[in-house]
Amino acid sequence: AEQLLIRSEKLSVAGQLAAGIAHEIRNPLTAIKGFLQLMQPEKMNVDQYFNIIFSELNRIELILSELLMLAKPQEISYRTSNIVALVKDVATLIETEANLSNVMIEQNYEESALLVNCDENQLKQVFINLLKNAIDAMPKGGTVTLSARVVQQMIEITVQDEGEGMEAEVLNRIGEPFLTTKEKGTGLGLMITYKIIDNHRGSVKIESEVGKGTKFIVSLPVE
Ligand code: ADP
């Protein structure tokens, strides 16, 4: 329990920092991008440089919008929601993307309605992050299984993939900002996931085996 507490303190400091940095950088960034677009060269062979600068600016923008998600307490509104319906909605949302990568989404819920007190948009973000990671972990396709059940006053939602799994060095550092093994990753998704679940008085457990797959178990208090 002590370890969990230390982690949540670390995250709230990081959240404040993230908001400050993101706000300071986003406005000048948007201006630079706008002017660069106006200056877009037509026939000169600087196109290549233009494209690199433009895609790097897009990447900075993506990182900043993810960081900003860490710092919006004023927009959070908690209410009683059916987490099974919420997870199903997210699965529908991600299905097209999953199919493009030959990933099937299987769903297996103990009951059709399980209630938690939550901010729906934040929890959707959590399951979007977990499902996208599961898809990324299976470049050759496979199945990701979503399930939900009640265990001792907690609702457990599981996202299980048959992907590449995680090396111990990655597993031990999960939740740290900018930890990524992906070429185009930001390494912020799971940090945000931990922060949101922490705000909901829940916890995240991970079981992972290299070459076999990964299971994320999100526990939230029953409403
Ligand atoms: P990103 O997806 O941008 O890299 P995340 O914070 O979502 O950032 O994930 C951090 C890292 O954790 C990933 O780069 C990957 O190495 C590892 N990871 C997360 N989910 C999985 C998974 N389901 N299977 C294997 N590795 C994973």
Image (cartoon, rainbow, N blue to C red):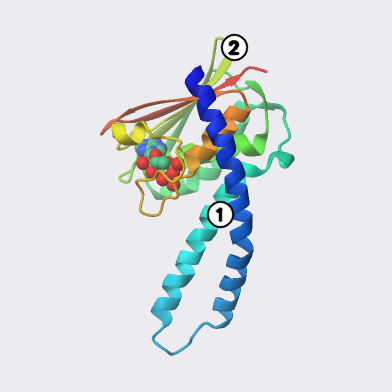
**Marking on residue 153:** 2
Q: CA distance from mark 1 to mark 2?
A: 37 Å
Q: Residue 216 or 104: which is nearer the viewer? A: 216
- Residue reaching furthest bottom? 43
In the picture, the quarter occupied by the C terminus is: top right
- 100 up-or-down from 157: above or below: below
Q: Residues within 10 Å of mark 1 (few under 14, many from 20)?
A: some
- 68 up-or-down from 29: above or below: above
Q: Is residue 181 left or right of residue 187?
A: left
- Three-letter amino acid code at disc 1? Leu
- Residue 7 position in % (x across, y down): 51, 29
**Secondary structure under badge 1?**
helix
Q: Which residue is mark 1?
A: 64
| First in residue order: circle 1 vs circle 2 | 1
Question: Residue, x 49% and y 85% (percent of image)?
Answer: 41
Q: Label 1 CB, ligand 1: below 8 Å?
A: no
- Residue 136 position in % (x across, y down): 38, 44
- Three-letter amino acid code at disc 2? Gln
Q: Residues within 10 Å of mark 2 (few under 14, many from 20)?
A: few
- 9 up-or-down from 32: above or below: above
Q: Quadrant of residue 85?
A: top right
- Residue reaching furthest top? 152
On the question of residue 197 being in view, the answer is yes
Q: Residue 124 or 187: which is nearer the viewer? A: 187
**Secondary structure under badge 2?**
loop
Mark closer to the observer (1, 2): 1
On the question of residue 165 being in view, the answer is no
Question: Residue, x 44% and y 90% (percent of image)?
Answer: 43
- Residue reaching furthest left? 211
- Residue 107 position in % (x across, y down): 48, 29
Q: Quadrant of residue 154?
A: top right
